Image: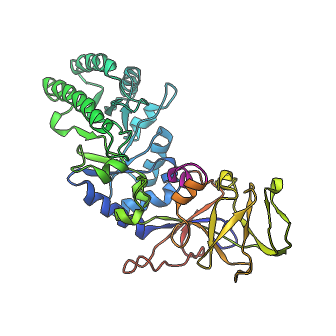
């Protein structure tokens, strides 16, 4: 990709920070294993950049939500990656998932039946992870579903060729980001009860549905991986923290030994003198109180910059913070730079190292840092950059003619 092809709004993806976060999290969750969650285009960071970087660093376990995501990831990483998906419906192509060696989460008795049918149709034994609703109230087997599932498993164990092997059991904490709340321990109790039942069944099946000792047990998410010691289970599914963002309201990434991976940047494309009393952008919701200068910056809600942060958010230019004034439009926004030394062509940091944080943007937009990075649209180029490993603060500049970009 050349500079002529490059979008004016770019998300720089720091490969060095990504590797460092993965290494720190691998150590934090040990002896449990790290599962890298790369759903939703790697939380907006670009799965085609993130997943190969992690794979090259030695990570082999990856999780996504949907079957299409899993199939694309298999094409991207090849045969030696362990990939699982858990969100699908009656019309999802489970046969394609089995042909691609995708492990599947099972959240309802009907889903188990569909996985078994796909296994029989393809002649491929499915690898399944039973997802337990331990209290989150979303997807997963409710306690009243478990007897029916166990009955199905017992029947399958009697078949000459059982259609699946039970590879794991999983759940998801609801409030692990609030360590003082009792619901996390309550969820763990519900999950452990289901695990005991499943383990007993696998033992009674004599290995025909998989060995109980090989069962992969995973309930920990990013908050749990950072707050619970020891981390429960044999593996932990970590998403947000992998990208160097904090899932905890009272902790910055640096407090957790993490470095933000994404730096969202644009540039000043117009600069004009504005008299006192002049308005800014649609609705004229901002009026200059004194003579000033407005800088026009590409980037709007068409790129994923939240309109709800209008008249609240700030950006950084030449290391100085400036306010966004007026409404953020589809393609652009206005920054009041006053009489500061700002010129056309200057880099503008929306968030990431050298600018505000994704968490600050979450506050300004009345949402969370998860959404700020994940909502970035396809119009924003993701550019993979390696900082000097000897000095993580010394960032290599973005060079669209030599870095990997999309």
Residue 94 sits above or below residue 27 on the image: above
Q: Quadrant of the C terminus?
A: bottom right
Give the answer, above or below, for where 265 lies relative to 88. below
Q: Is residue 14 left or right of residue 268?
A: left
Q: Is residue 401 above or below residue 287?
A: below
Determine whether, in the image, residue 72 is placed left or right of residue 173.
right
Q: Position of residue 4 (x, y in %)?
A: 70, 72
Residue 302 within the magenta-colored segment of the rendering = no
Figure quadrant of residue 143: top left
| Residue 127 in view | no
What colour scheme has been applied to the protein in the rendered image?
rainbow
Can you give x and y, in whole percent of width and height, for residue 304 in the image? Answer: 64, 54
Q: Which residues are magenta?
A: 365-374
Residue 396 is situated, as x and y percent measured from the top left of the image, at: 50, 78
Q: Residue furthest bottom?
A: 341
Q: Nearer the viewer, residue 369 or 144?
A: 369
367 part of magenta stretch? yes
Identify which residue is drawn at 24% across, 48% down. 231
Q: Is residue 105 visible?
A: yes
Q: Position of residue 96 (x, y in %)?
A: 45, 35
| Magenta-colored segment: predominant secondary structure | helix
Quadrant for the N terminus in the image: bottom right
Q: Picture quarter containing residue 273?
A: bottom right
């Amino acid at each position: 990709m050349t500079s002529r092809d490059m979008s004016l709004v770019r998300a720089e993806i720091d490969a060095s920070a990504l590797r460092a976060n993965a290494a720190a999290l691998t150590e934090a969750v040990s002896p449990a294993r790290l599962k890298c969650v790369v759903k939703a285009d790697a939380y907006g960071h670009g799965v085609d950049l993130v997943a190969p970087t992690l794979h090259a660093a030695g990570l082999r376990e990856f999780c996504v939500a949907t079957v299409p995501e899993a199939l694309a990831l298999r094409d991207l990483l090849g045969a030696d990656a362990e990939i699982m998906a858990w969100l699908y419906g009656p019309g999802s192509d489970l046969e394609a998932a089995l042909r691609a060696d995708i492990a599947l989460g099972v959240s309802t008795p009907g889903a188990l039946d569909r996985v078994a049918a796909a296994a029989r149709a393809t002649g491929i034994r499915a690898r399944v992870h039973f997802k337990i609703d331990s209290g989150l109230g979303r997807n997963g087997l409710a306690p009243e579903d478990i007897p029916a599932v166990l009955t199905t498993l017992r029947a399958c164990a009697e078949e000459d060729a059982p259609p699946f092997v039970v590879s794991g059991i999983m759940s998801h904490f609801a409030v692990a980001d609030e360590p003082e709340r009792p619901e996390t321990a309550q969820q763990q109790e519900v999950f452990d009860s289901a695990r005991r039942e499943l383990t007993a069944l696998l033992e009674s099946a004599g290995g025909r549905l998989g060995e109980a000792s090989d069962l992969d047990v995973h309930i920990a998410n990013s908050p749990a991986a950072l707050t619970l010691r020891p981390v429960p289970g044999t593996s932990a599914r970590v998403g947000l923290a992998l990208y160097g963002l904090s899932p905890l309201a009272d902790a910055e990434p640096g407090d957790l030994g993490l470095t933000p991976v994404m730096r969202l940047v644009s540039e000043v494309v117009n600069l004009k003198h504005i008299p006192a009393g002049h308005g800014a952008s649609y609705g004229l919701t901002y009026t200059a109180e004194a003579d000033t200068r407005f800088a026009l910056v590409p980037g709007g809600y068409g790129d994923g910059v939240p309109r709800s942060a209008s008249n609240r958010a700030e950006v950084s230019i030449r290391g100085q913070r400036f306010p966004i004034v007026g409404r953020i439009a589809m393609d652009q926004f206005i920054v009041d730079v006053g009489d500061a030394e700002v010129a056309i062509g200057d880099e503008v940091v929306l968030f990431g190292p050298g600018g505000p944080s994704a968490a600050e943007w979450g506050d300004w937009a009345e949402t969370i840092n998860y959404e700020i990075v994940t909502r970035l649209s396809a119009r924003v180029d993701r550019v993979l950059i390696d900082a000097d490993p000897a000095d993580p603060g010394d960032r290599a500049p973005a060079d669209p003619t030599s870095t990997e970009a999309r």
